[in-house]
Every structure is written in C-alpha cells, then in structure tokens.
C-alpha cells in the first residue's frame, strides 16, 4: 500500500481492523487527503463561475459566514441556518432586484442549528438532538421557539440533521451515522425518520443510509429520493456518492455493502450474518456520482422560472472533496429524470474550484427555490448566498408542479387497519399452548423498564412445549395504537423446537446467536427486534398481545422481514397458538 503524508496512522488502523476479521479480507487502497485552500471570492474569481447558456449566477447576499441550509417561505423571505454561529438569519428582497435588501437579521439562536423546513406559517429547526418550531410573524421574524422533540439519536461523525415535509404532510428527518462504517448501537442512526403531524410518534422509514443530507420528492411520481455520502478512505474513486430511491422498509447497504453492490472489506455484520446475505437484502444505488464529492441539499425543480425541460429534474449541491487527490464536487449538479426515473447526473454550476483545482471560493451546501423560480445556493466557506437565475429566451413551464401524496401515504399505511395476527386466517389452528412471563402477570401492567420510555429491554417470555413442533414464532402487537393499528413491537421466528422460553433483554439485532439462528423482523417503528411499549402520554392503557405460535417447519423468511411477510409464510403450518396480554400507560411526560 502506498502511504501519503498524514495517512500512515489511518492506514495502519485499517490494516489492524481487517486483520481482526478472520474472513480472508486483503484489500489495499491508495489514500489521499487534499483540501484546496480557501481564497476570497473576488469579482475576478466569481467571473469564472459557469452555468448553462441563458443562466446567470450572482451574489444574493454576502458576509453570511457559515451559511448552511436554505428555506424559502411563501412570502419570499429567505432563511439560512448557520451551524458554526448557532443561529438562523432572515434575508428579504422586497424590491425584487435579486439581492437581499439589508444585512442578515438573526431570528433564532440554538447551538448546532442546521436543518430547516417551513409549513403552514411555521418554521421548523433541527439541531443535533432537538427539533423546534416557531411561528413566522408578518415581518418575517419568528415567535418563541418551542421544542417538539428532544431525544434524537447521538450524532457522532454526522451531526448535520436535515428535515423536510413530505407531500403526505409528515416531517422527514435524516439522521446520519455516528461513524465512517460501523454497526450502530442506536437503530435510528443512519436512517430516514418520519414524524406524525402531531409529533407524538416517529418511525424509521429506511436504513443503511450513511448520511443522506439531501432528499426531496419527485414532483411527478411523488417518490422520495436522496443522495447519500459514500464511505471514506477507500481510495480516490471509491465509494461513489449514491443516488437512491428511498422506500419504506428498505435497506440501502451501509455499512457492509456500497454503491451498486460492492462489499465493504472492513466491517462485520452482527449475528454472524454473511455480507452476501446483507447484500441480497439491500437495494443498490440507482446512480452513482464522483467519489467524495459530498452531496448536500437536494431540490426537485417544481417552478416556472427555468426552461420547461428542467421541471421535474433535481439539483444537488456538492460541497467538495477532501479525501481524493484531484478535488471533486464544489458545484451544483443536475439529475435528469424521465417518467419519474433518474437517468443521468451532470454538472450544472461550476467554477467554485479555482487556480486549477488548488483553491476554492465556495463550498456549496444549502439549496432552495426562491419565490421567483431562481435557485439560491449557500456557501459555508466564504458566506455567500448565490442566486442562479434564468435570463434566456427558452420557453418556460406554464404552471408549477406539486408532488402527489399517494405514494408516501400508501407506504405509511402499509399493514395498518387489520386485526391482530392471533385472529387472522394466516394463523388458524386448533391447537393451544400457554404463554407466560416472569416479567409481568396476565392482564396486569407491564413494568416501565420494558417500555421505550425507560430501559426498553425485552421481557422474559415462556410457553408450553407442543409435540411435533419444529419451530416457534413470537409476535407482539398493540391494537390500541392510532392511527396505525395494530403497531408491531416484536417479531421473532425460527426459534428451535427445544427452546420454550426467551430471557429478559434479548439482543435487538436481525439474527441471534443465543438462541442460535433465531431471526427477528421489522417493527412498525422500523427497528429490528424488541421495541417496547411507547403509547402517547395520557392515553388510556394500551393492550399488548404477546403471541406464540408452534409451527410444523422452520420458515424460509429472511431476517428483517415485516409481519405480513412472516404471516404469509406461516399460513397452513400453525400447530398451536397462545397469547399473553399485558397493559401499559404513560402518565408522565419524560424529561427531554
């Protein structure tokens, strides 16, 4: 392996990690750290910015310092978060000349302020751990910030949360991984999260997303797309930045599979899962872009300010590389779509790299469509907010686009509005078994430590043996939940026939090694394994149905499967069944 200055320690650490795997891995990489120097955005250097014919790129505002995410209100007011300054600033262009009228005005202050979203006259702000909301006043200023969520997962390496409201009215939040490549302890890391409109519940939409800062909904199909950051330290050209179509319940490879299906050499899945299994159950990227280009905010063009051919395409800021010798990124790219599908990725605005790629005048981060249809791009290096406008003569679209709500609503409602599994035809059986627990008595309250408000550990569970049983299945559901009902809290199958009990605190992972080979599935929360009771504070006690099924076979169902997939495989193979019902209510709101 060829070592470059400053990388010897990193390479040695990688070699040590690979050696510990014991799986024959032997991978070398030529690694660079190259950070082009920042230089001032003088008029001469700005003259080198390039865009397609008919487009102009001019400063909308300057002196913003660490400008990150951009959001535009229906009024045209522009809000920019500044992570390093820990605030949000307001910019206005009342006279419509394409420049902010006054210096930036600070309208909110929270440490780590980053992601922004606007809906129904309110501005939403997310930091590393908290989500806030404030009313937008007529003058653009904000009312008092109110905390909606205070327990987002720890961030680690990727602390820059981003948020957006989907066409279904729900808030989506990207929670990046804590590391370059690791098995996360908190299943909400490296995911896309979704919050109900009342913010009483949240679910994991998709997993295996290392750091999807930029995401948006294709305005013709209504589908969610996102651009994920690839793994570092694999060489100049690995791994590509990933464009993904993000679907509920899907896994996107990280940390064990990258790009179109390459195996990452250093990591080891938990539960003795083979990487080929992980690959088979992961979705490959739709398109890739230059490694280490660092995709940031993503916007589908829905307006009428650009030529009609741009409608329905996406624009993405690429903040720029530090982990390859020839700098990449430092640009805005265009993702061309046809019939709702991504076809290609190409540079759109370039020239922020200067002096032959040795220096830069901007690191693009924020991107939003202004009220007049132009694009506003935030540079977090020199603090310029650039305006990309079309001034040519090509025909423009007659009306704006709006993404349909149907696809996201269908994904969110999947598996809802059905009875508990115990009463469904897929589990029909004449045989009976008895289910008990050392953790709580039949019909009694489940202790708080088993809930997600406290320790969140799985309770002990036991059942009577059934002659001729080849395996057992456990399903736990809450039929009192709303609006999704019933909520699935636990799925476990291929429990060996010799096993008639599960201990307290079972591992929350796809495959168990004790008891050996037990597989666990996806809960309504989107996590794998036990997810404890978490009813809204103040609700009457919810009833939790712990169901055990004896089967005449082992099931050929992959780990991570959902309840309906599991039930379909069980049908016709249930020898006996039984259930234990406990209750849980949360009276006191937990401390944030």
Image: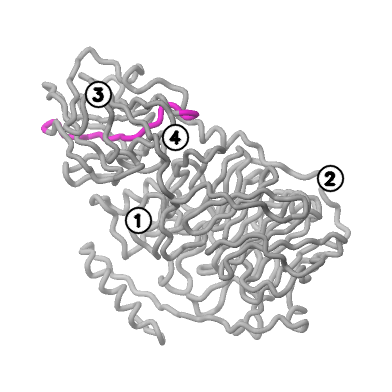
Near mark 2 (Cα within 10 A), the count class, few <14, some 14-19 or many ≥20, is few
Callouts 3 and 2 close, C-beta under 8 Å: no
Q: Secondary structure at mark 3?
A: strand
Q: Which residue is mark 4?
A: 536
Q: Nearer the viewer, residue 146 or 508?
A: 146
Q: CA distance from mark 1 to mark 3?
A: 32 Å
Give x and y (percent) for residue 405: 63, 36
Tell us which disc is closer to us: 4 or 2: 4
Q: Is residue 496 magenta?
A: yes
Q: Which residue is mark 3?
A: 580
Q: Is residue 6 magenta?
A: no
Q: Nearer the viewer, residue 536 or 98?
A: 536
Q: Earlier in the sequence, mark 1 or mark 3?
A: 1
Q: Which residue is mark 2?
A: 398
In the picture, the disc for residue 184 is 1
Give x and y (percent) for residue 301: 71, 52
Callouts 4 and 1 close, C-beta under 8 Å: no
Q: CA distance from mark 4 to mark 2?
A: 46 Å
Q: Nearer the viewer, residue 359 or 130?
A: 130
């Amino acid at each position: 392996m060829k070592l470059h200055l400053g990388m010897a320690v990193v390479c040695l650490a990688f070699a040590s990690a690979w050696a510990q795997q014991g799986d024959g891995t032997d991978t070398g990489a030529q690694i660079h750290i190259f950070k082009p120097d920042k230089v001032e955005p003088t008029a001469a250097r700005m003259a080198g910015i390039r865009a397609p014919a008919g487009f102009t790129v001019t400063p909308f505002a300057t002196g913003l310092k660490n400008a990150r995410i951009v959001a535009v209100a229906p009024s045209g007011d522009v809000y920019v978060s500044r992570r390093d300054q820990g605030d949000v600033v307001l910019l206005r262009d009342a006279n419509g000349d394409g420049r902010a009228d006054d210096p930036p005005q600070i309208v909110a202050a929270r440490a780590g302020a980053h992601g922004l979203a606007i809906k129904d006259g309110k501005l939403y702000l997310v930091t590393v751990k908290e989500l806030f909301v404030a009313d937008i006043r007529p003058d653009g200023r904000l009312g008092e910030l109110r905390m909606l969520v205070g327990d987002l997962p720890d961030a680690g390496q990727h602390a820059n949360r981003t948020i957006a409201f989907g066409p279904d009215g729900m808030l989506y939040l990207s929670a990046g991984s804590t590391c370059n490549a690791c098995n996360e302890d908190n299943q909400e890391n490296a995911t896309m999260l979704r919050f109900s409109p009342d913010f009483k519940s949240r679910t994991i939409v998709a997993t295996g997303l290392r750091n999807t800062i930029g995401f948006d909904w294709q305005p013709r199909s209504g589908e969610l797309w996102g651009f994920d950051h690839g793994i570092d330290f694999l060489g100049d050209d690995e791994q590509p930045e990933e464009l993904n179509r993000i679907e509920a319940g899907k896994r996107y490879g990280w940390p064990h599979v990258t790009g179109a299906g390459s195996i990452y050499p250093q990591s080891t899945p938990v539960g003795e899962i083979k990487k080929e299994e992980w690959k088979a159950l992961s979705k490959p990227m739709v398109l890739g872009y230059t490694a280490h280009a660092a995709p940031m905010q993503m916007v589908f063009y829905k307006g009428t300010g650009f030529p009609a051919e741009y409608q329905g395409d996406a624009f993405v800021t690429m903040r720029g590389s530090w982990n390859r010798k020839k700098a990449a990124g430092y640009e805005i790219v265009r993702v061309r779509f046809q019939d709702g599908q991504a076809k290609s990725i190409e540079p759109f605005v370039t020239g922020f790299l200067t002096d032959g790629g040795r220096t830069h005048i901007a690191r693009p981060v924020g991107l939003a469509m202004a009220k007049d249809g132009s694009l506003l791009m935030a540079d977090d290096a020199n603090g310029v907010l650039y305006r990309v406008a079309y001034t040519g003569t090509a025909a423009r679209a007659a009306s704006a686009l709006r993404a349909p709500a149907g696809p996201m609503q269908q994904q969110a409602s999947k598996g809802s509005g059905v009875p508990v599994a115990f009463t469904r035809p897929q589990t029909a059986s004449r045989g009976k078994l008895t289910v008990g627990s050392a953790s709580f008595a039949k019909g009694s309250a489940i202790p708080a430590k088993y809930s997600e408000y406290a320790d969140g550990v799985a309770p002990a569970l036991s059942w009577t043996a059934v002659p001729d049983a080849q395996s057992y299945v456990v399903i736990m559901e809450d039929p009192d939940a709303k609006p999704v009902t019933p909520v699935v809290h636990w799925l476990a199958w291929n429990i060996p026939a010799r096993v008639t009990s599960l201990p307290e605190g079972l591992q929350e992972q796809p495959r168990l090694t004790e008891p050996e080979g037990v597989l666990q599935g996806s809960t309504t929360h989107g996590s794998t394994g036990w997810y404890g009771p978490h009813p809204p504070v103040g609700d009457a006690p919810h009833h939790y149905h712990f169901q055990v099924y004896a089967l005449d076979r082992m099931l050929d169902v992959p780990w991570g499967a959902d309840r309906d997939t599991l039930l379909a495989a069980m049908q016709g193979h249930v020898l006996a069944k039984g259930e234990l019902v406990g209750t849980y209510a949360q009276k006191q709101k937990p401390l944030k």
